[in-house]
Image (spheres, helix red, strand yellow):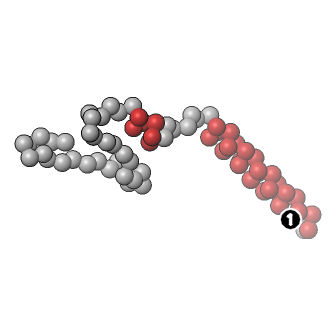
Amino acid sequence: MFIHRTIHGKINHIFMVAALLFFLIFLSCFPALPSWNDQLSDIKMPEGFTIEVFTDQVPGARSMALSPNGTLL
């Protein structure tokens, strides 16, 4: 009985290590996403205007504002 538990424990350990290695190799196949700063640097703003990331913790967030002359921003 002791030998069976020892072998079973080693097999579980080997399986966990193999699964972790597979997962790390799988993740390395995908390119890193560009940072927010890289994406914002591509946006050209008129003089006097700025753009920045307020938070990246709200997925899919959007913002709109209505100007005094009725333009939707």
Q: Residue furthest front?
A: 48
Indicate the secondary structure of the residue bearing disc 1. helix
Q: Residue furthest left?
A: 69
Across and down, in percent, residue 45 comes to 30, 34
Residue at which label 1 appears: 5
Q: How many marks?
A: 1
Across and down, in percent, residue 15 comes to 76, 51
In the visual, does 49 lie left or right of 6? Answer: left
Q: In this rendering, does residue 59 appear at all?
A: no
Residue type for callout 1: Arg
Q: Is the N terminus in the top left, top right, bottom left or bottom right quadrant?
A: bottom right
Task: Please tell me which residue is depicted at 32% across the width and 31% down the height of the picture.
Answer: 44
Q: In this rendering, does residue 64 appear at all?
A: yes
Task: Please tell me which residue is depicted at 57% across the width and 34% down the height of the picture.
Answer: 31
Q: Depth check: 6 or 71 in front?
A: 71
> As displayed, is residue 9 above or below residue 71?
below
- The quarter of the picture where residue 73 lies is top left
Q: Depth check: 26 or 57 in front?
A: 57
> As displayed, is residue 59 above or below residue 25?
below
> As displayed, is residue 34 above or below residue 3?
above
Task: Please tell me which residue is depicted at 14% across the width and 47% down the height of the picture.
Answer: 66
Task: Please tell me which residue is depicted at 27% across the width and 40% down the height of the picture.
Answer: 49
Across and down, in percent, residue 11 comes to 82, 54
In the visual, does 19 lie left or right of 37? Answer: right
Q: Residue furthest bottom?
A: 2
Q: Residues within 10 Å of mark 1 (few under 14, many from 20)?
A: few
